Image: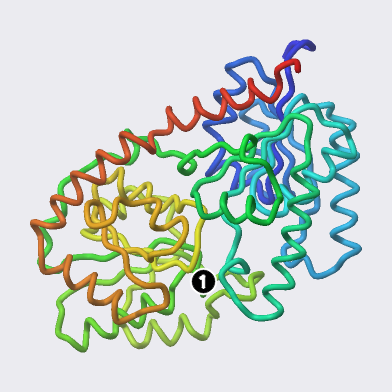
């Protein structure tokens, strides 16, 4: 690449997340003349990043964040990396990269900073004394991280935006709203519902408590007790490194019980949605969930929770149904309503695809990001 190329550095926790959520944006930036760098924890996906012509840097992001010395070491390594890479723009993605990367960017005097706040986490929903103390600390860290000379903070939903503004962590003029990471409308195409005798409901997510996994399983039990003829499929795997993960013992119990079909991790989500009638995500809070964006593109009716992020990924009562969070009965009621009303599902399928074409297409999302890079890297 030319020595005169502008440099764009993505900072993410995991290399596989970069490939799944930011790759099209990086490719477009490369075509626009940027030399693209990626900083993440090591992993098998690093080779794929380098194969795309991007320059990779390893940074030791710890999963738990419990050891302050490890966290300080991560911050110091980011400062050193930023000084060495001399990027014109750094794009910080997810909580730790935004917090640590924002502070490091100030210390290293990075010219332009883009911070993607793709969800504030459930600590901003909890109301215990400990949660309030953690919120105060995190808000202070955001305030320190988001004091930049040239800054754009990308939010996926207005609740997260308003929360950080209310804490005084940033100015409204630095805010950009982009609805999610985008979806390829060709890869996730709308196909007719399968004509199987039993409607299929799919939930695809990391198997964490705050994704609503236990509510999904309980809803399946309720539907069975009501005699509703439906097939409930759970796609995803346990995450031993996460304290809120479903355990292997719980998965074994569910297998024996047989109310949900455990599919494990699947890379073919478009095919799984094509073989389903309804997509479900009873999460406790999101940025803007990719699974619901993909469901809209595939033309599948959705049942999800009335929480930040989830409600922003649908048009309520047009592309899907909203239910209260942590309410298995309401979840089962909404699923049953869609199972028993094929005409409603058909209307929602059409409206969902139209929503995806209007708001979620990867081309529109990519163009918005490249424009932001131009804004923060401009001379000023």
**Count of marks placed on residues:** 1
The image shows residue 47 at horizontal and vertical percentages of: 66, 39
The answer to which of 303 and 166 lies nearer the viewer is 166
Residue at image position (59%, 74%) is 126
The answer to which of 142 and 278 lies nearer the viewer is 142
The image shows residue 29 at horizontal and vertical percentages of: 60, 23
- Snapshot colouring: rainbow
Q: Quadrant of residue 37?
A: top right
Q: Identify residue for label 1.
A: 210
Q: Is 303 situated above or below 360?
A: below
Left or right side of 30 for 356: left
Residue at image position (33%, 48%) is 270
Q: Quadrant of residue 194?
A: bottom left
Q: Quadrant of the N terminus?
A: top right
Residue at image position (64%, 22%) is 375
Q: Is 294 situated above or below 38?
A: below
Q: Is 191 situated above or below 252?
A: above
Callout 1: SS? helix
The answer to which of 135 and 334 lies nearer the viewer is 135
Q: Quadrant of the C terminus?
A: top right
The image shows residue 351 at horizontal and vertical percentages of: 21, 45
Residue at image position (29%, 77%) is 330
* Mark 1 closeness class: few <14, some 14–19, many ≥20 residues within 10 Å: many
């Amino acid at each position: 690449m030319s020595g005169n190329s502008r440099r764009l550095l993505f900072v993410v926790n995991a290399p596989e997340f970069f490939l799944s959520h930011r790759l099209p944006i990086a490719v477009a930036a490369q075509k626009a003349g940027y030399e693209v760098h990626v900083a993440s924890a090591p992993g098998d996906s690093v080779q794929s990043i380098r194969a795309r012509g991007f320059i990779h840097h390893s940074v030791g992001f710890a999963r738990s964040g419990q050891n302050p010395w490890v966290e300080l070491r991560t911050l110091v390594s980011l400062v050193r990396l930023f000084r060495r890479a001399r990027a014109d723009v750094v794009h910080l993605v997810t909580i730790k990269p935004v917090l640590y990367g924002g502070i490091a960017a100030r210390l290293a005097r990075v010219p332009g900073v883009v911070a993607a706040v793709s969800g504030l986490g459930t600590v901003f929903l909890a109301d215990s004394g400990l949660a309030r103390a953690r919120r105060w600390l995190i808000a202070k860290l955001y305030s320190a991280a988001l004091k930049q000379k040239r800054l754009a903070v990308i939010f996926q939903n207005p609740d997260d935006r308003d929360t950080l503004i209310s804490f005084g962590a940033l100015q409204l003029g630095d805010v950009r709203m982009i609805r999610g990471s985008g979806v390829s409308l060709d890869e996730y195409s709308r196909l007719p519902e399968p004509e199987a005798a039993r409607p299929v409901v799919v939930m695809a997510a990391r198997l964490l408590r705050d994704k609503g996994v236990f509510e999904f399983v309980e809803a399946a039990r309720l539907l069975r007790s009501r005699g509703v003829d439906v097939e409930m499929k759970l796609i995803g795997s346990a995450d031993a490194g996460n304290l809120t993960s479903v355990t292997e013992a719980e998965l074994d119990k569910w297998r024996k019980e047989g109310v949900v079909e455990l599919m494990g991790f699947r890379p073919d989500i478009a095919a799984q949605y094509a073989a389903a009638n309804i997509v479900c995500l009873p999460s406790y809070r999101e940025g803007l969930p990719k699974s619901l964006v993909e469901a809209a593109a595939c033309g599948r009716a959705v049942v999800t929770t009335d929480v930040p992020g989830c409600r922003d990924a649908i048009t309520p009562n047009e592309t899907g149904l909203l239910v209260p969070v942590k309410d298995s009965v309401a979840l089962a009621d909404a699923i049953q309503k869609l199972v028993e009303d094929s005409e409603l599902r058909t209307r929602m399928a059409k409206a969902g695809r139209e929503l995806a074409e209007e708001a979620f297409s990867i081309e529109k999302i990519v163009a918005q990001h490249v424009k932001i890079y131009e804004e923060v890297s401009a001379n000023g």
